[in-house]
Image (cartoon, rainbow, N blue to C red):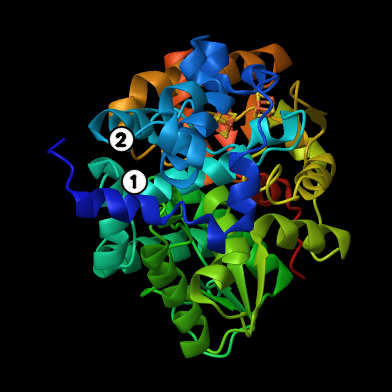
Amino acid sequence: MENLTKETIDKGLEVLDTLNDGKLLTHLNSCVHCGLCADSCTYYLANPEAKFIPATKVDLVASIYRKYNTFGGKAFSKIVGARTLNEDTTNEMVDLLFGACTMCARCVSHCSIGVDITYVIKKGREMLSNMGMVPETLQSTIDSALETGNNMSIPETDFVETLEWLEEDLQYEVDDDNAKIYLDQKGKDILYTLNPREPKFFPLSISAMAKVFYVTGESWTISTKMYDVTNYAYYSGNYNEAAIITQRLYDEAENLDAKKIVLAECGHGSRAFRWEGPNYIKKEYPFDVTTSVELLASYLKEGKVKVDPNKIPDKVTLHDPCNLARSGGIWHEQRYILNKCVSDFVEMTPHGIDNLCCGGGGGQLAMSEYNDRRMAIGEIKAEQIRATGAKIVATPCHNCVDQLTQLNVTFKLGIKIMTLGEIVADAIVMETKD
Ligand code: SF4
Ligand code: SF4
């Protein structure tokens, strides 16, 4: 890292202006150092060093706040544990706030007094973003999204070709030459989004949702210009970039006159667009927004999709994406779906809102420099899966699918990883043609 200029340091410190952020002021000053959050964090569980305790990450940001914003911090730095924002603390922040946190928020629910630890970590990431210190690997994923409209820089022609052969597959699967994957259609009820990992690596999850939409007779379309549900700027702390990405999907929904956006199975993408997005762009959405998980559950509840759980006889367990379950409150719906669609569903321990992160959140999948740590914390998830005896792990998040796929190989789990759309599609009972 080059020497930090005063201008760079000032940009970082701007984020700690608590005159405009009472919540930050509260959570920077509330920790009572009880240590109860330690065992909630997979980084600490995998490597029990004090620096990996969630409270240490909070204190890193709080110590810098104290230095510049309190009398004690200015006058008696050592006594009150106030630290200067310099190259050492900046390096430490990058290492701990980007490199040792998946922003899973499990520590928040375990904190004895309710410190919003991830809020403070996000503020620390925002400081680093203001200072131009976002890891290049993470920033390049965001740059791809900003430059090309999708974070994997998939050319539009390749994307369209992929969807064309998926449409042929769909027609074969449902035995109907008129079955369609609708592209860029105006006035449809649903604008369906995708995680770019789907066209690139996991196209079967697109086929699965297309089959579900076919069976329900849904009015839907995919945009070839703006289909990317992800928003990695949510992870980097650059909310100007997060707003640009959010606004693009907003504009495409308006352009296509869609009534509703359905967010593909993606934890952080769902959170970034549905819950954070209106704050990024500072306006409400004039259309409905829902997740695929909620939509699939509603199709089953309303009887729009008929399923036979005996079509999936293997033992199935569920990995809850942190951003959907713990932070989004969506955790009943995936259980409803699995209880309808598979014959042997078993929960992990712990699960639901107390589930352990798979290790792929927080932008970790993009930041290859922390791969060793990611796999070390992933081993905890791998053993959690192994203990269930499940042959299939369902998860409504493509980042989780990617991480679980790597854990499957590394820790020889012998499992199949499926999205909920794939589970529903496999369990569908097609009505016979006359
Ligand atoms: S958000 Fe998750 S990974 Fe980050 S400090 Fe808390 S428990 Fe650890
Ligand atoms: S559980 Fe909460 S109060 Fe206790 S050390 Fe952790 S952050 Fe601080």
Q: Where is residue 414 in the image (x, y as percent from the top left)?
A: 54, 17
Q: Quadrant of ligand 1?
A: top right
Q: Look at mark 1 in the image and give the residue it sits on.
A: 128
Mark 1 and mark 2: Cα distance apart in space? 8 Å
Q: Which image quadrant is residue 415 in?
A: top right
**Visible residue check, residue 120:** yes
User: Residue at 49% across / 46% down in the picture?
Assistant: 122
Of the residues shown, which amino acid type is indicated by label 1?
Leu
Q: Label 2 amino acid?
A: Thr
Give above or below for 355 relative to 137.
above
Answer left or right for 18 relative to 184.
right
Q: Ligand 1 near label 1 (Cβ, under 8 Å)?
A: no
Would you place residue 326 above or below residue 145 in this image?
above
Pinpoint residue 270: horizontal percent, then vertical percent.
58, 57
Residue 414 visible somewhere in the drawing? no
Residue identifier under label 2: 90
Q: Do the residues labelled 1 and 2 touch (CB within 8 Å)?
A: yes
Is residue 423 or residue 75 the one in the foreground? 75
- Decide: few, some or many residues near mark 2? Use Cα within 10 Å; few <14, some 14-19, many ≥20: many
The earlier-in-sequence mark between 1 and 2 is: 2
Secondary structure, mark 1, is helix
Q: Where is residue 54 in the image (x, y as percent from the top left)?
A: 57, 27
SS for dot 2: helix
- Badge 1: residue crowd in 10 Å (few <14, some 14–19, many ≥20): many
Q: Find residue 154 and report its horizontal and vertical position in percent.
A: 28, 59
Q: In this view, does 19 lie to the left or right of 433?
A: left
Identify the residue shown where x is 37% and y is 50%.
13
